[in-house]
Amino acid sequence: MPHTNRRFLLTQRPVGAVRRDDFTFETVPAVEPGEGQVLVKNLYLSLDPAMRGWMNEGKSYIPPVGLGQVMRALGVGEVVASNHPDYKPGDHVSGALGVQDYFTGEPQGLHKIDPRLAPLPRYLSALGMTGMTAYFALLDVGQPKAGETVVISGAAGAVGSIAGQIAKIKGCRVVGIAGGAQKCQYLKDELGFDGVIDYKAEDVLAGLKRECPNGVDVYFDNVGGDILDAVLSRLNFKARVVICGAISQYNNKEAVKGPANYLALLVNRARMEGFVVMDYIKEYGKAAQEMAGWLASGKVKSKEDVVEGLETFPETLLKLFSGENFGKLVLKV
């Protein structure tokens, strides 16, 4: 019996915030797998700030989603039919499955996962690209040392919350910048952050002076804009700034706001470095093993914000940019 596939196609390049009419939502028969292909029923999709960048024309670290193509998304799903010797029906996989009910294609880039070891949404958070981003961006680019002060923006988000916990494991003093009393309380009480700054309720620079009286050694930036500028003014000698994301800038209709305080890098002989997790694919195995150990021991906690309904995709994606999500945003198909 043929499967019905609901899917979102990108039909125009968004200007500013994403809108539903930037996509076509259609229902078509799922394509049966050909030679060397698999048919995967999508169960959960990862919603990430990077998706906004994937919709833009222009040079980036990954080609943009083509107009008329299924919107790109990472996901986890179950193989329901296979013409590939390495995959059989019942296998669970993760990879770029797209915003749709069913993925059909060669399993290049798909990885088998075990639902008995962790809940499936966790393979999109701490045990997935999110966890790998936090791990490599902090440890390889940020290079935190015990006793240093690490500041994380977007600290209650998917990547920031895990990066902060890893910094604590490494013996650092960790300060999180987040929006709202509930998120800030969670960072302190549940995740063990040493200090918090509520950017919605206080001046960030004043908060940095209070929480980081001895300056900032590592800044893990997920937001860009004014908060990046504020932290640059508090850098220590030989500080490291990790540019992991800039969610405050992704929906700009004008040019991206660059850092006015960049000369702080010169004065403090500090460095600012961009990070893309795909550069580390060959090292995922080792990192995932260590992350699984931290999760099992309770040293790292992972929070998933699961929203039901593929049809809600455009509106649910916007939760990332308003700060409504709490933890890793996942769409249950």
Image (cartoon, rainbow, N blue to C red):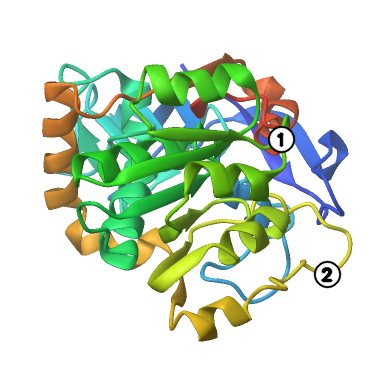
Q: Residue at x 40, y 70 (%)?
A: 239
**Residue 78 in sight here:** no
Mark 1 and mark 2: Cα distance apart in space? 27 Å
Q: Toward the viewer: 57 or 139?
A: 139
Task: Please state if 235 lies on the left or on the right of 12 as rendered.
Answer: left
Identify the image quadrant of residue 17: top right
Identify the image quadrant of residue 42: top left
What secondary structure is found at the residue carrying circle 2?
loop
**Residue 298 in sight here:** yes
| Mark nearer the N terminus (1 vs 2) | 1
Q: Residue at x 75, y 32 (%)?
A: 25
**Placement of 105 over or under 246, stated as above or below:** above
Q: Residues within 10 Å of mark 2 (few under 14, many from 20)?
A: few
Query: Pointer 1: what residue?
Result: 202
Q: Residue 56, percent across and down?
A: 72, 62
Q: Amino acid at mark 1?
A: Glu
**Placement of 161 over or under 233, stated as above or below:** above
Task: Please state if 85 lies on the left or on the right of 98 as rendered.
Answer: left
Q: Amino acid at mark 2?
A: Ala
Task: Please state if 299 lies on the left or on the right of 107 as rendered.
Answer: left
Q: Residue 57, percent across and down?
A: 73, 68
Q: Residue at x 58, y 51 (%)?
A: 50
Q: Toward the viewer: 316 or 199?
A: 199
Q: Residue 252, percent across and down?
A: 82, 57
Q: Select label 1 or label 2 by which is in front.
A: 1
**Placement of 90 over or under 143, stated as above or below:** above
Query: Pointer 2: what residue?
Result: 255
Q: Residues within 10 Å of mark 1 (few under 14, many from 20)?
A: few
What secondary structure is found at the residue carrying circle 1?
loop
Q: Toward the viewer: 108 or 312?
A: 312
